[in-house]
Image (spheres, rainbow, N blue to C red):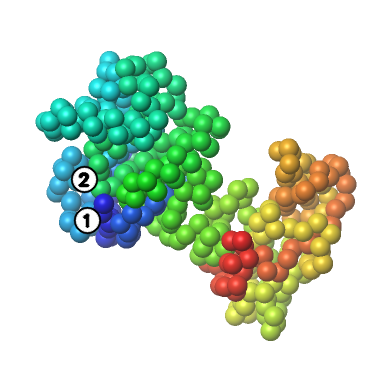
């Protein structure tokens, strides 16, 4: 097991800078998830840690040792790709054993490692099959098994579940959590999936255009995003971000006016001059139908129903985009409904997209 440290890690392909001054300290045994828009550098960062890409500038260390000049095979890491990359002509047993055979380990030791990995992943009954005789989920398990037998100090996973169907993803998500618990090994995991990031991560690293935007626990990023980018990126459906103007900063917090004229009271202190342009944020799950504070009247434009949950898209006079609002009951299209924006669930951002600090008590409530 080992910690992983990046210091001012930068990577260019030709004249394009893909990673810029990435500083990151990953603790021994931590489960870290990289998220960010397509092309932001997640896979490149993983490949830099693996040694599949060199750095243009900066340093990578694993277990306290600088590995910039260490070959991938000698870094004590194992990487699992989205494509699995199994050897099609080899049986599952041979796929699992292959890396160990290259290391010229004794036969008995290889057999024991293969049996142990197969038991951990529940693929013992598949050892004599070829990859093409396996389902997608089983192939994925073999790919993970091939990483486990090498007893790496750090696991690197690049979107390992993205080829699986929804039900299998959920099942494999539990298995990843269990695997991390059993092995206790440092894991670095790239995903596009919000739920995977929120449920698996000890800490999430949000990347944007090759830079680290914010690092924190899922609860911290959800309740206290540093920027409008992180606020919009963490959470699904996405946070509503509404153009607003600062009216006054009262003892209880800032009062803002939305484009359509609605006055919204927050509990956030905004030490800015009245008239300042702001963005007000509220997550879809935090509206209260017919609530008390900050009531606004809306018209239902359309509704998405997921069985038990309904997402209403609600037109509020003066706003171009409808509000996305989680509702317990399905409203009729075109009906008028009143929703409240509870002050303790609001977010404020200044004109630069930086978040104004929210009261810390809010985090406990949001995380609950
Ligand atoms: N070998 C390469 N040569 C040139 N440019 C590259 C190379 N590899 C990646 N890039 C560029 O680097 C940027 C980051 O790519 P990367 O694959 O790390 O993104 P990503 O965050 O993993 O995206 P996705 O979510 O789509 O997988 C992209 O703009 C990509 O086009
Ligand atoms: Mg990628």
Q: Residues within 10 Å of mark 1 (few under 14, many from 20)?
A: some
Task: Using the image as rendered, state which of residue 333 and residue 100 is in the foreground.
Answer: 100
x, y percent for residue 51 = 22, 44
Q: CA distance from mark 1 to mark 2?
A: 9 Å
Q: Can see residue 257?
A: no
Which residue is found at the position 76% from the left and 49% from the top? 327
Q: Secondary structure at mark 1?
A: loop
x, y percent for residue 120 = 36, 36
Compared with 255, 299 (above or below) is above
Which badge, 1 or 2, is on the more N-terminal residue? Answer: 1
Task: Using the image as rendered, state which of residue 56 and residue 197 is in the foreground.
Answer: 197
In the image, is 188 to the left or to the right of 341? Answer: left
x, y percent for residue 61 = 22, 55
Which mark identifies residue 76? 2
Q: Is mark 2 within 8 Å of ligand 1?
A: no
Q: Secondary structure at mark 2?
A: loop
The image quadrant that residue 280 belongs to is bottom right
Task: Using the image as rendered, state which of residue 109 and residue 72 is in the foreground.
Answer: 109
Which mark identifies residue 63? 1
Task: Using the image as rendered, state which of residue 11 and residue 180 is in the foreground.
Answer: 180
Which residue is found at the position 33% from the left and 46% from the top? 183
In the image, is 341 to the left or to the right of 132? Answer: right
User: Which residue lies most toward the bottom here?
Assistant: 251
x, y percent for residue 232 = 57, 54
The image quadrant that residue 123 belongs to is top left
Which residue is found at the position 17% from the left and 56% from the top? 65
In the image, is 271 to the left or to the right of 125? Answer: right
Quarter containing the C terminus: bottom right
Tell me whether circle 1 and circle 2 mark residues in contact (CB < 8 Å): yes
Compared with 335, 245 (above or below) is below
Which residue is found at the position 43% from the left and 55% from the top? 202
Q: Residues within 10 Å of mark 2 (few under 14, many from 20)?
A: some
């Amino acid at each position: 097991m080992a910690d992983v440290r990046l210091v001012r890690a930068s990577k260019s392909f030709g004249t394009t800078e893909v990673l810029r001054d990435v500083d990151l300290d990953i603790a021994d045994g931590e489960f870290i998830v990289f998220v960010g828009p397509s092309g932001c550098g997640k896979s490149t960062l993983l490949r830099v840690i693996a040694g599949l890409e060199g750095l243009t500038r900066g340093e990578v260390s694993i277990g306290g040792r600088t590995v910039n000049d260490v070959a991938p095979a000698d870094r004590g890491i194992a990487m699992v790709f989205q494509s699995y990359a199994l050897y099609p002509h080899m049986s599952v047993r041979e796929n699992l054993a292959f890396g160990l055979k290259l290391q010229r380990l004794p036969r008995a030791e290889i057999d024991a490692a293969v049996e142990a990995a197969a038991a951990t992943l529940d693929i013992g009954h598949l050892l004599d099959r070829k990859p093409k005789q396996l389902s997608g989920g089983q192939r994925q398990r073999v790919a993970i098994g091939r990483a486990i037998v090498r007893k790496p100090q750090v696991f690197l996973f690049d979107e390992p579940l993205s080829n699986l169907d929804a039900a299998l993803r959920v099942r494999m998500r539990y298995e990843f959590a269990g695997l991390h618990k059993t092995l206790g090994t440092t894991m670095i995991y790239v995903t596009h999936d919000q739920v995977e990031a929120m449920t698996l991560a000890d800490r999430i690293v949000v990347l944007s255009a090759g830079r680290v935007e914010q690092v924190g626990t899922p609860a911290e990023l959800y309740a206290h995003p540093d920027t409008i980018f992180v606020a919009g990126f963490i959470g699904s459906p996405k946070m509503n971000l509404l153009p607003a103007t600062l009216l006054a900063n009262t003892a209880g917090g800032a009062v803002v006016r939305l484009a359509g004229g609605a006055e919204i009271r927050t509990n956030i202190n905004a030490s800015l001059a009245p008239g300042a342009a702001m963005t007000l944020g509220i997550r879809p799950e935090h509206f209260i139908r017919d609530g008390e504070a900050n009531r606004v009247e809306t018209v239902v434009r359309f509704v998405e129903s997921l069985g038990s949950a309904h997402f209403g898209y609600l037109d509020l006079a003066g706003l171009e985009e409808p509000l996305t609002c989680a509702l317990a009951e399905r409203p009729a299209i075109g009906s008028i409904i009143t929703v409240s924006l509870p002050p303790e669930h609001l977010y404020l951002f200044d004109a630069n997209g930086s978040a104004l600090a929210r009261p810390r008590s809010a985090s406990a409530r949001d995380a609950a």
